[in-house]
Image (cartoon, rainbow, N blue to C red):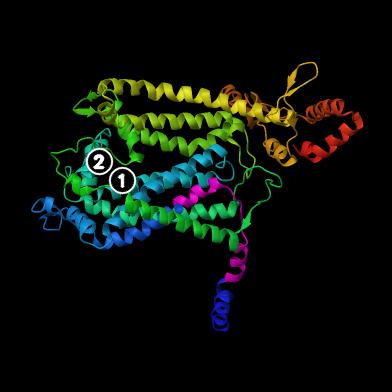
Amino acid sequence: MKAVAGPLKWADDRLGLATAGKSGLRKVFPDHWSFLLGEVALYSFIVLLLTGVFLTIWFKPSMGEIEYEGSYQLLKGIQMSEAFASTLDISFDIRGGLLVRQIHHWAAILFVAAMMAHMLRVFFTGAFRKPREINWLMGVGLFALATIEGFAGYSLPDDLLSGTGLRFVDGLIRSIPLIGTWAEFFVFGGEFPGTLVIPRLYMVHILLVPAILLGLIAGHIGLVVYHKHTQYPGPGRTEKNVVGYPMFPIYAAKAGGFFFVVFGILMLMGGFMQINPVWKFGPYNPTQVTAGSQPDWYMGWVEGAVRIMPNWESHIGPTTWSWNIFLPGVGLMGLLFTVLGVWPFVERWITGDDRDHHILDRPRNAPTRTALGVAGMTCYAMFWLAGGNDIIATHFHVSLNSVTYFMRVAVFVAPVIAFIITKRICLALQRSDRERLLHGSETGIIERAADGNYSEPHVAITTDEAYTLTQHHLLEPVEQSEGLDANGVPDKSLKVSGTRAALSRWFSGANLAKPTLAELEAAHHHGDDDHAADSGTGEDDAHGALDDDQPKELSSTH
């Protein structure tokens, strides 16, 4: 220790590492399984960087044609690009190359999946609210860049399947009104497929997008530390504290162990679950298309939207406006990321809630938001299923046209049904919570009285559970206002339009009110009186039980 004391003191005098390290190591993080979703995304990204370095050493990002002379006999003598040939060499001639390739591909899929699940957790629990709007925007940017990064890496091997995906993107670019052709020439260096797209995608995949991702991830984590971590409602948890474990040694040990769990699972997947066998597809040929081709799952919804879109085109002067490609492709992706980006500000405008939020919502206590999220997931799922309409038709022996027509209706009808069902479930769960507060927990025991009546006794819930069930803040719908202050002076900040008031009633008006102190006391008196009648105890004992089971601090605070 003496040997390192000098250098450490030298560094601390100049950089202040001891003070920063002490506060950082004692940083408290709450403990809940859903917080691991973001960690899975982070650890998958680390695995992508590690395996990507290995693949970069052997991959040749060139579209120059050569005759394959490698060890895979079925393609020997076939003309192909150097990119595809080097992918085959990595798979068959580099020791451990195929394992690393498959780990890399599985990590990319897990990275996007974990990021999407993490964003859904943030959305459904309201973790995007003030003061975390900027962090939410960073998350949306990370999600968009992750899809671009995944698609760029998916296209690099220059096989027939990835080339079909590039042809799809070429169509999306050319469908942009007025500038589509010029944009295509800029991306591909001429007409599709050109000779430059693989080298350009390679630089985007290994340098440009990873650098931006690293910067956004650093900023994202930095804001989590700055704002302190959100936490679920529970006893002892307030908007001004964090209940959990310190970074060192508990959280660091758990996080480190979890990284190796994620890495180990990805290694098992790469070793035992085949993915992207490019040798079966062969080199890319613009005159061919892989039968039954499907993109990676995170791009399948865009293809599904294009597949079921009616053939809408406009001819304006010498130009053709391909709405059947532009709207479901470019337009739908733009709509998704725009809606995700503006939602925190839209919800704050609707509800008028400008408070800082560090305690998360239980999804049932924000039924409209939860229902909207499920409706969006359902719409996404319908588009995703439509992306495999040919596979559905062939496997289930139904008409392809029938599947397409059904999906055209389902993308509009299914989200509405999902919204209604989800909101009703959330309200039913609110009623269930209210019943538990007022009448306690069901025991599952049926008792028969002397007069022949049957009843089920209830057990009072714990104070901790009652605290959790009543900790949320009920949002009152904003009322329409002309924007006059107490002195009758116009104030634009106080003005509420009729549209905003109607949206606020729609968003918050259906929430059930929490039981009041009087209702809780009456419910406890009722239950204790019934118990006293059976056991022969008096009313004073019942009142004492109320004082023990339901502390006044709980009701006065909430």
Q: Residue at x 37, y 46 (%)?
A: 109
Q: Amino acid at mark 2?
A: Gly
- Quadrant of residue 311 within the rendered picture: top left
Q: Residue at x 14, y 43 (%)?
A: 285
Residue interval drawn in magenta? 16-41
Q: Is residue 504 magenta?
A: no
Q: Is residue 80 left or right of residue 456?
A: left
**What amino acid is found at the position of numbered circle 1 in the picture?**
Phe
Q: Secondary structure at mark 1?
A: helix
Q: Position of residue 271 (x, y in %)?
A: 32, 54
Q: Position of residue 329 (x, y in %)?
A: 32, 33
Whether residue 60 is visible: no
Nearer to the camera, 525 or 112: 525
Q: Could you say whether the residue bearing mark 2 is in a helix, strand or loop?
A: helix
Residue 534: quarter of image: top right
In the rendered image, residue 39 lying in the magenta stretch gets the answer yes
**Dot placed on the residue nearer the N-terminal end, 2 or 1:** 1
Quadrant containing the N terminus in the rendered view: bottom right
| Residue 165 - label | 2
Q: Is residue 112 left or right of residue 374?
A: left
Q: What is the chief secondary structure element of the magenta stretch? A: helix
Are the two marked residues, 2 and 1, in contact with CB atoms closer than 8 angstroms?
Answer: yes
Pointer 2: residues within 10 angstroms few (<14), some, or many (20+)? many
